[in-house]
Image (spheres, grey):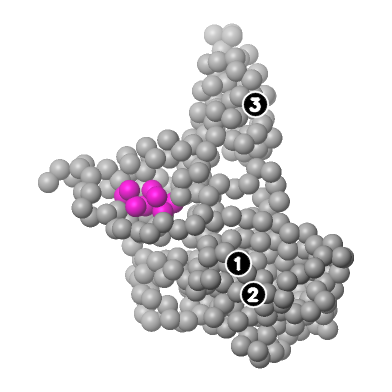
Amino acid sequence: MDKNASPKADKTPQAPTEAPFTTFIQLSGRSTVPSQFRVPGTFTITRLQSPAGLPDRISKLSPVPALLVSISLKSLPSSSYKVWTADKLIPTSMVQPFRSNVIDFDSQPRCWAGSAFDYVHYSVPRQGLDDIAEDLGFGRVNSYRLAVLEDDLVVAQITKSILPFLGRSDRLSVLALDQFCLILGAHLVQQYGVLQKTAQPSKGGLGPWQKRRASELLHENMHGRIRLSEIARECGLSVSHFARSFKASFGTSTHQWLMQHRIDHAKQLMSRTSMSLIDIAIQSGFNDQAAFTRTFHQLVGVSPGRWRRHYTTRHSRT
């Protein structure tokens, strides 16, 4: 059999899932908060701020089996914070910044904050966690341990990394959010999952035809609107297995690979055309020039305008 052929019959069928998204809710002192807060049946990141706290406790509900991961961004006195699971009050102390809660939605979590608060909430469906656990060699995770006000450095760090993107006009692409979900999910499985056996994660990379197909799809979807699950399905792999294999093959995540490809494409346009920077930004997959400039500076070390001037000056002398 040709090793470069694409074995279509081996593809793993995967049901399409709703796209992940982020939202930033800023309550006012007069805002009304529903007693039941329903999250979508997909991976979501919600930042919730209030200058006055909640008048009463709220229940958090999910239409699918999922974990609720909450992390405080500011302190709260112990007298102004309460958490219940299955109608049982959980003992708590003063809330320190960047302390985490990990609670299964099946336990019917409820909470109350009586003074100003700032929280980031992650809703993480169990189906995605099951896929990650299987790829890591754990099998199905039956339950997750309850954690309240946990000093989890990993959740704290990844929350700090996502904060600058919450509430911004140039939101993260669904591809970036899929990747973020995998990172958080792998940590939740290993840190909070009640595991059945020792992990034996897959270590191999993508086959030649899988590398070609993944690259083609990323090239064709430079704006990052394609889902990680779509690329994985085309390669006949689960999402978690694909993400791990992609990084083994390319040395970077799909989102980081795409960011570098956008910048390389922009460099070609700046060096070969007289297009404006805003047009180059749009053609390179960015929502606006500000997002393009930020990413370019992060990856190259200088602004696009300065890079273009330097390139033009250098090549005009040769």
Measured along the vertical axis of the image, is residue 38 above or below residue 56? above
Residue 39 - label: 1
Badge 2 local density, few (<14 within 10 Å), some, or many (20+)? some
Say which amino acid is labelled 3: Ile
| Image point (66%, 91%), residue name | 88
Q: Is residue 241 left or right of residue 157?
A: left
Measured along the vertical axis of the image, is residue 139 above or below residue 14? below
Say which amino acid is labelled 2: Lys
Of pointers 1 and 2, the one earlier in the residue sequence: 1
Residue sitting nearer the eye, 241 or 175: 175
Q: Is residue 124 left or right of residue 97?
A: left
Q: Secondary structure at mark 2?
A: strand
Q: Residue 93 falls in which quadrant of the image? A: bottom right
Residue sitting nearer the eye, 200 or 166: 166
Q: Position of residue 116 (x, y in %)?
A: 84, 69
Residue sitting nearer the eye, 106 or 131: 106
Q: Are marks 1 and 2 in contact (CB under 8 Å)?
A: yes
Magenta residues span 228-235
Q: Of circles 1 and 3, which is in front?
A: 1
Does the magenta-highlighted stretch encompass residue 230? Answer: yes
Residue 8 - label: none
Q: Position of residue 23 (x, y in %)?
A: 66, 56
| Image point (48%, 66%), residue name | 186
In the picture, which quadrant includes the C terminus?
Answer: top right
